[in-house]
Amino acid sequence: MSATPIRRRATRVVALAAVSLIMLGGCSAAQRAPSSYDGARDNFIEGCESVAKSDNSNADAKGQADVTKIASPKDYCTCVFAAYKKNVPYSDFKKTKARMDDEGGPLPDSFIKAFSSCKADAS
C-alpha cells in the first residue's frame, strides 16, 4: 500500500485534533484558550484520539480493509503533539488553527513534515 493514503488519513486526524484544541479548551466560560503548547497538551491529545478512534470505527463499519488504522491513537497523538511542540512555534499553530476554522483546507506542509516520523500503523 502506498504511503499516500496513510499520510492523508493521518493528516486528517491531526487537522481535526488541531481544530478541536481550542474548542475543547473553550468549552466553559471559566476556561481561557491555551497560551502555549503546555496548556494545550491534554485537549490536543484528547481531540486527536477521539478522531482517530472514530475513523478506525468508521473504517470497520464500512468494511474498508484497505484503510490503514491508527494502531495506538494515544501513542500516535502524543508523538504528533511532541513533534509540533518541538518544530512549530505555538503562534504558527494558533494562526493555522484559526485559518482552518475560517476557511478549512489542508495543513501546511511544514506541519505535515513536523509529524511525518510518527507512525500511524503497526508496521
Image: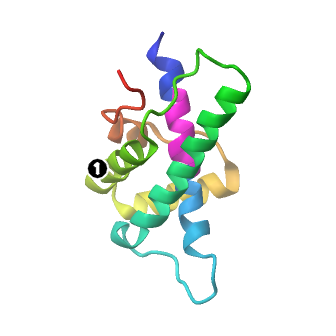
Q: Residue at x 55, y 46 (%)?
A: 15
Is 85 situated above or below 6?
below
Residue drawn at 42 percent across, 27 percent down: 121
Residue 22 on image: x %, y %? 56, 67
Magenta segment: 8-16
Image location (x, y in percent) of residue 56 = 59, 34
Residue 15 drawn in magenta: yes
Quarter the C terminus occupies: top left
Residue 115 locus on image (x, y percent): 36, 40
In-image side of 54 versus 7 (left or right) = right
Q: Is residue 68 left or right of residue 74?
A: right
For the residue pair 10 and 55, the one nearer the viewer reads as 55
Corner quadrant of residue 58: top right
Colour theme = rainbow
Front residue of this view, candidates 108 and 17: 17
Quadrant assignment, res 64? top right
Query: Where 26 sits versus 107, above or below?
Result: below
**Horizontal arrangement in the rendering, residue 28 relative to residue 83 (left or right):** right
